[in-house]
Image (cartoon, grey):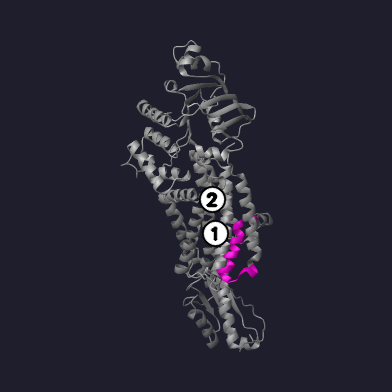
Amino acid sequence: MIRTFIALVQKEFLHILRDKRTLIVLFGMPVAQVILFGYAINTEINHARMGVLDRSRNDQSVELIQRFSVSDYFHEPLYLDHLDQIEDVFRSGQVKMVVVIGPELGKGLIRGSASIQIVTDASDPNMASVMTQYAQGIIGKWLKDKTNGTYGPQGIITTSRMHYNPEMRSVNLFVPGVITVILMLVSAMLTSIAISREKELGTMEILLVSPLRPGTIILGKVIPYLVLSLVNAIFIFLIGQWIFHVPMQGSYGMLILSGLIFISAALSLGLLISSIARTQQLALMLSLFALMMPTILLSGFIFPVSSMPIPLQVLANIMPAKHFIVILRGIMLKGVGMEFLWKEVLILTGMSVILLFISVRKFKIRLQ
Amino acid sequence: MNDTVISTQGLTKKFGDFTATDHITFDVAQGEVFGFLGANGAGKTTAIKMLCGLLTPTSGEATIAGFDIYEEAESIKKVIGYMSQRFSLYQDLTIRENVHFYGGIYGLSGADLKDKANALLARLGLKDEADKLVSGLPLGWKQKLAFSVSILHEPRIVFLDEPTSGVDPVARRQFWEMIYEAAERGITVFVTTHYMDEAEYCDRISIMVDGVMEACAAPSELVRQYDAKNVDDVFYQLARKGKRKE
């Protein structure tokens, strides 16, 4: 029994290792994705160019401007003389944000009527809102220092702080997402293709005629892909850590446990697809459209689930990936454990059990 | 030699309204080379799949090596070998890996597996090519290898579903020599074919027409019964009655 199982697993690994192209794609794609999301699709701001229209020209305003230029976020500012120039510098693309300091900043602070305006070029809305937040942060800090922590007579100033990802590094969000997508890809898509390939080529018949039990055949097919998924997930995780210093706040045990639960859900989906699809091509199409696209678009990987219309939110909640991403981000970025994630873990476990049950029942011993 | 290893009684398989095999009844003795003839779509593959446990019959009885096909399918699987119509070795594995894999799933291992695999490769003259991918072999060789693999675990019966289709005459001849060798070792060979010259090599043949077994006897006896020149002629007389298209 064990020997026949080993023979089966060995054979499956030979298939995987011999297919060099797929292996390159499997390990190359996550690297490319992480690097792409880490560098290119970058919403953080480093040394952005800004403009200043200083109508006070006193010690206070100079100090405020200095606060901007010494921060890592903004570069030495471009000084403007007129309000009209703002339009010009936006149009020419020289700067994306201009801080307008009203006259008599120092007196205004005492009177409670100082005016500072932040004008941004919102043709790139993400950039504009991120810059505004940074600028507000700098001004708020300055104001606090100036007024000994009272924020002056005007009392309330809104300051926002970004928790868990203070620099708003998108790579921190994308690494858990890429891990999820890759696990889904390897576990579900490759498994379904591997099984339907045997059906298509007719070798499945030979396996079914042999004394192997159906459960053994399924396990022998699935275990190699489980191993491959794990290796790949660890690989992506390490890239995130080494190249982008993605934080890992929570426990590794929790990470591996939830990973295994998610992988079994994905493997079951792969089995289910292979029991429907007779050919590799059909298995590929089904996994692409039924699994990959929703996983990428609906899981919260790129678009936040909470801002989707209700029907799509419902759909997103049916996807195992959505819950897994919540868990991963919770563990990696927030460092929380079971006490906060038990709901997602429970949902994911339930999904895996149900999917596994259905797919094993659907896998037929006899062909008809 | 007279032990019955395959015995069927009114074996029937329906797919919806379509009756693929219609009450076929026959016995095959130990060590016999039993030919199963019929035009495409006559129900040969369906019959073989039922006997191997790949399809559940709609009605009828059958025993393989004394085991009931409904009740003791697991025991049957241990004593049969099967070579399907489609090429059933893994193209992306080497010859040796294929042999080891198929030996492995039948529970062979260690020195026993190694010896059997080496003997097989030596018999086929593939020792030097053992570590090449199967995809590079010519079709005739692939089929010979597939057959050798299907009897590697020394089954009592081997089912061959159109093993020689598309193979050149020389390779077919060699293939049949291998079948005879297996039969001499006491392995019962159940083979489907649509080459009439191959039918002459069988101890006994049965001819299927539209899912019904029209004739079942030794080739020479059939020729006498139907007052024909040869098996081809017998087959033509019977097959003409068939209405089924492919």
Q: Is residue B117 left or right of residue A260?
A: left
Q: Position of residue B53 (x, y in %)?
A: 56, 36
Choose between A38 and A133: the one closer to the eye: A38
Per the image, the residue denoted by label 2 is: A219
Choose between B30 and A177: the one closer to the eye: B30
Amino acid found under the numbered disc labelled 1: Thr
Q: Position of residue B50 (x, y in %)?
A: 57, 32
Q: Chain of mark 2?
A: A
Q: Position of residue A262 (x, y in %)?
A: 58, 58
How busy is the neighbourhood of tag 1: few (under 14 within 10 Å), some, or many (20 plus)?
Answer: many
Query: Mark 2: which secondary structure?
Result: helix
The residue lying furthest to the front in this view is B2
Q: Is residue B207 visible?
A: yes
Per the image, the residue denoted by label 1 is: A180
Q: Are marks 2 and 1 in contact (CB under 8 Å)?
A: no
Residue extent of the magenta highlight: A318-340
Choose between A215 and A137: the one closer to the eye: A215
Figure quadrant of residue B186: top left
Choose between B56 and A91: the one closer to the eye: B56
